[in-house]
């Protein structure tokens, strides 16, 4: 009897992914990857908008003790049948392509500094349109006043999280572990950015710094420092995916309304017109002769470029050198990170501030985002709901 029950559970938990939906899943993964690059937007947001959120949570959950048992006993057929590898492979392929595309081909992180109204406007329009799209798909009886309570609760919680002020925190094993566990949970929650959580915990720069040391002479030290973060992320992902899968199975509409609330709450930090505060930190220092072409270029620069990373002149190490060509200077690589933002309405600010704001780029970005919802609605219908029902 127990064996029959086990086989039945295996059938229910089997990955429903069909290779024919490969292009659609890769496009959805591409959208997730592009969202993860922008602070304030999470991959979970795009997973929810494109209709694969349930499948993503259940796919993560499939990496359970049963899958580990199959792996340890070399039961390849059972492992392939239980673990949702096809779904995750196609989705992560799209995520990887997006990260490569928006860092190598179209540097989205640079455009966030040079054209912030356009980039944030695009995601603002996408999320506003998706909120109405998602609410329209919830059954009418769930949209009554009772359904409004989880929506309001999700909105308040989402708004509270994205408006928290970063504070000084320790770098102990336990705290870095907790930071990893909570930030990975945020990455799969719509409307809450994992990178923003790391900023709140004051660990964004710390983690990036340790990642930057990989591949250098300090690789071993970096791996030791990253270990608690990685362990925390794995623990958080395993535990939180089980909580979410249980909620989606037993309280699907209510959970969906709370998640939509998170999206509404996140609009505060995605509004394209913001007074953004950045913190700069020196990531690397190189010593070069003053005759070096890079040094000459930096000497002629009047002000630093608007970019997430840039180089600037540092100290002259031997200013008393007899000949100028023998002087050596420090060239600093500086990293900018977003610390806080305060939205404003460009129609009700001073003329000086309005002149610094590209009103039309923000409007164009929001319009494009709203138009893209039509394509996303098509993606949602492509195998999304049918497969989700099979998973649940």
Image (cartoon, rainbow, N blue to C red):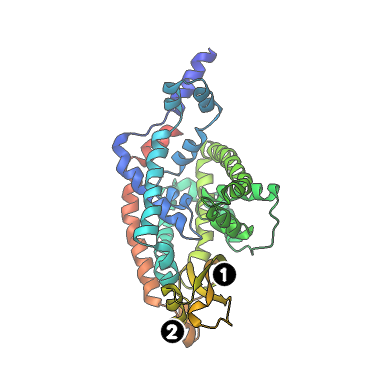
Residue reaching furthest top? 1
Side (left or right) of 89 relative to 330: left
Disc on the earlier residue, 2 or 1: 1
The number of numbered badges drawn on the structure is 2
Residue 373 lies, in percent from the top left, at 35, 56
Find disc 2 in the rendering and name its residue. 355
Under circle 1, the secondary element is: strand
Q: SS for tag 2? A: helix
> Going 37% across and 40% down the picture, which residue do you hit?
90
User: Which of the pair 299/310 is nearer the observer?
Assistant: 299
Regarding residue 40, the answer to whether it shows in the image is yes
The foreground one among 307 and 312 is 312
Residue 187 location in percent, x, y? 52, 50
Image coordinates of residue 389 in percent, x first then y, are 41, 35
Q: Residues within 10 Å of mark 2 (few under 14, many from 20)?
A: few
| Residue found at x 70% / y 51% | 172
């Amino acid at each position: 009897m127990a064996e029959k029950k086990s086989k039945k559970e295996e059938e229910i938990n089997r990955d429903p992914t069909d290779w024919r939906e490969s292009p659609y899943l890769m496009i959805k993964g591409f959208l997730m990857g592009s969202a993860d690059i922008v602070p304030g937007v999470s991959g979970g947001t795009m997973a929810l908008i494109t209709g694969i959120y349930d499948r993503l949570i259940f796919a993560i959950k499939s990496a359970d003790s049963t899958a580990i048992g199959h792996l340890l006993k070399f039961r390849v057929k059972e492992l392939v049948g239980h673990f949702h590898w096809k779904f995750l492979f196609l989705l992560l392929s799209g995520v990887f392509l997006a990260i490569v595309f928006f860092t190598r081909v179209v540097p989205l992180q640079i455009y966030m500094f040079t054209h912030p109204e356009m980039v944030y406007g695009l995601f603002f329009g996408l999320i506003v349109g998706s909120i109405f799209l998602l609410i329209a798909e919830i059954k009418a009886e769930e949209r009554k006043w009772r359904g409004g309570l989880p929506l309001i609760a999700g909105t308040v919680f989402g708004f509270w999280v994205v408006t928290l002020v970063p504070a000084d925190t320790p770098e102990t094993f336990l705290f870095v572990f907790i930071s990893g566990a909570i930030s990975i949970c945020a990455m799969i929650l719509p409307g809450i950015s994992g990178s923003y959580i790391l900023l709140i915990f004051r660990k964004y720069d710390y983690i990036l710094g340790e990642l930057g040391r990989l591949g250098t002479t300090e690789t071993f030290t970096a791996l030791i420092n990253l270990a608690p973060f990685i362990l925390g992320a794995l623990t958080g992902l395993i535990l939180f995916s089980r909580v979410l899968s249980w909620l989606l199975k037993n309280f699907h509409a209510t959970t969906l309304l709370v998640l939509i609330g998170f999206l509404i709450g996140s609009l505060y930090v995605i509004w394209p017109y913001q007074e953004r505060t950045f913190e700069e930190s020196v990531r690397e220092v190189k010593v070069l002769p003053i005759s070096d072409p890079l040094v000459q270029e930096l000497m002629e620069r009047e002000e630093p470029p608007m970019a997430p990373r840039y180089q600037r002149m540092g100290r002259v190490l031997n200013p008393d050198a007899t000949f100028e060509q023998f002087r050596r200077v420090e060239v600093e690589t500086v990293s900018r990170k977003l610390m806080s933002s305060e939205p404003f309405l460009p129609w009700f600010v001073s003329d000086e501030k309005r002149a610094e704001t590209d009103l039309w780029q923000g409007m164009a970005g929001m319009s494009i985002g709203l138009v893209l919802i039509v394509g996303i609605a098509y993606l949602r219908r492509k195998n999304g709901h049918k497969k989700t029902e099979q998973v649940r």
